[in-house]
Image: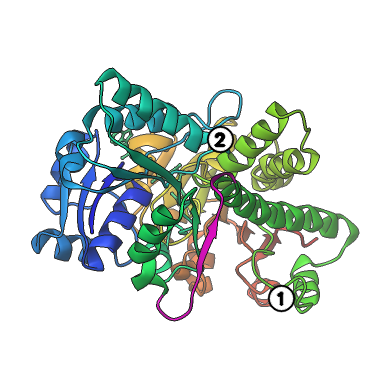
Amino acid sequence: MKISVIGTGYVGLVSGTCFAQMGNSVVCVDIDEKKVKELRDGIIPIYEPGLEEMVLENYKNGSLRFTTDIKEALDFSDICFIAVGTPMGEDGSADLKYVLAVATSIGQNIKRHTYIIDKSTVPVGTADKVREVVQKALDNRNSNLTFDVISNPEFLKEGAAVEDFMKPDRVVIGADNEEALNVMRELYAPFVRNHDRFIAMDIKSAEMTKYTANAMLATKISFMNEIANICERVGADVNQVRNGIGSDNRIGYSFIYPGCGYGGSCFPKDVQALAKTSKDFGFVPKLLNAVEEVNFAQKKVISNKIIKRFGENLQGKNFAIWGLSFKPETDDMREATSIVVINELTKRGAKVKAYDPKAIKEAKKFYLKDNPLIEYKKSKYDTLDNCEAMILLTEWKEFRSPDFEEIAKRLKNKIILDGRNQYNKKRVQEKGFEYHQIGVS
Ligand SMILES: NC(=O)c1ccc[n+]([C@@H]2O[C@H](COP(=O)([O-])OP(=O)(O)OC[C@H]3O[C@@H](n4cnc5c(N)ncnc54)[C@H](O)[C@@H]3O)[C@@H](O)[C@H]2O)c1
């Protein structure tokens, strides 16, 4: 099939590459000229396991191309995915300016019937808006071309995006006619060969499904973090409580790990966007508001522990930070807890030495670029010298079994603050450390 993907970010690049891998011809479009040039030169703008090899292979064999010219892409394709960002607007709503700008370009440029697919995460009713905008642009051209708008929310996880796309748990399609649905069935058939994980529904329900999934996952995290905060105060150990409840198969073990808050480009913005949609329709979403409120506070749990331990004035003190990305296996730092923790410490005069296996470039370039009190190190152990404590914020595999003797030797005090509960408390304490976890007194 001939496919264009507009927006070559985490979702667009992974989707386009995976479609190409299955034998389709794909053109990925982006307005970012530098990104497109780099992709053509074989430089991959993001880190995702397995992505680089797949992009290079498909670019080399001609099934994947990159351009800044949407017209060229639409001239070529019958199926056009919209995969641009939907950032949070000032009032918490999803900002649709990029999606609707692309819809206008589509209306201005298509030359044949086109299946237009919303892959960006968009609020209920967006497909109708896209349809209106495309139709208006066609009317301005006096064109009687026809088109379909389909909703196909994306559920890939950063850090496992290629694997999730190639072997999805489900493919959700919202369409208003059988033919459009069949085109999507054909496109996704190679991805759901083992058993049918294709879920067809109406467009609004598909749009709602994506927000509901993210809101549910964020709720599980905030719920467990709230329980952790209670455990800490009453003298219980949330790690044991987690084991105790996870064994109930109505609850299960996944997504009930306590920690120092969720981040990333999706949960915070999607929970707030759903809350805003709900409010716009006259319903106050008390639970969704609380989920975000709990998470906002949770991002400060680690810095509050430090202030409690070392006092408000952190002048002259150094802290070692392990992990900057919002989760392991990605360089994405959007809404990462590390940003909050580091800024809370440095605004009280502390200096920070930080290490992350993949995200240092992002931190320096964007998210912490204005903070002069951070020194970036090439290895986790190099962060420790002359520091009051080691603070773990992202559960990268290389942090799981560190050399505690090396940590003890290099830190000024033998103190670890673990924002992801990675270590066995008893064993770390036996090594002479003062060890602080989330949800353990
Ligand atoms: N990142 C994820 O894990 C994830 C998962 C599922 C869904 N989503 C959703 O997918 C959408 C995209 O997210 P992302 O993380 O890939 O965003 P991103 O910011 O990584 O990428 C968006 C890309 O779109 C480009 N763009 C903007 N306007 C454009 C235009 N007019 N024409 C061409 N390109 C344009 C930008 O330059 C950028 O490269 C969002 O709605 C997001 O909520 C993201």
Percent position of residue 48, x then y? 34, 60
Q: Does residue 38 appear to the left or right of 367 in the view shown?
A: left
Q: Front-most of 136 and 281?
A: 136
* Left or right of 22, for residue 385: right
Magenta segment, which residues?
Answer: 193-204
Identify the image quadrant of the C terminus. Answer: bottom right
Relative placement, left or right, of 173 versus 69 is right
Task: Answer above or below: position of 266 versus 155.
Answer: above
Numbered label attached to residue 125: 2
The location of residue 274, given as percent across then percent down, is: 64, 39
The quarter holding residue 52 reads bottom left
The residues tagged by marks 1 and 2 sit, at their Cα atoms, a distance apart of 53 Å
**Residue at figure coordinates x 31%, y 51% from the top left:** 46
Q: Which residue is located at x 13 percent, y 58 percent? A: 59
Three-letter residue code for mark 1:
Lys
Indicate the quadrant of ligand 1 in the picture. top left
Residue 282 in which image quadrant? top right
Q: Is residue 133 above or below residue 226?
A: above
Snapshot quadrant of residue 164: bottom left
Q: Amino acid at mark 2?
A: Gly
Depth check, front residue: 356 or 152:
152
Q: Earlier in the sequence, mark 1 or mark 2?
A: 2
Image coordinates for residue 153, horizontal then vertical, percent: 48, 51
Label 1, on which residue?
426
Circle 2: element type = loop
Q: Is residue 203 magenta?
A: yes
* Classed neighbour count for the residue bearing mark 2: other residues with Cα under 10 Å, few (<14), some (14–19), many (≥20): some
Q: Badge 1: few (under 14), some or many (20 or more) residues near its Cα, within 10 Å?
A: few
Q: Looking at the image, can residue 44 be seen?
A: yes
> Residue 296: x, y in percent?
67, 40
Is residue 359 a member of the stretch shown in magenta?
Answer: no
Disc 1 is placed on an element classified as helix
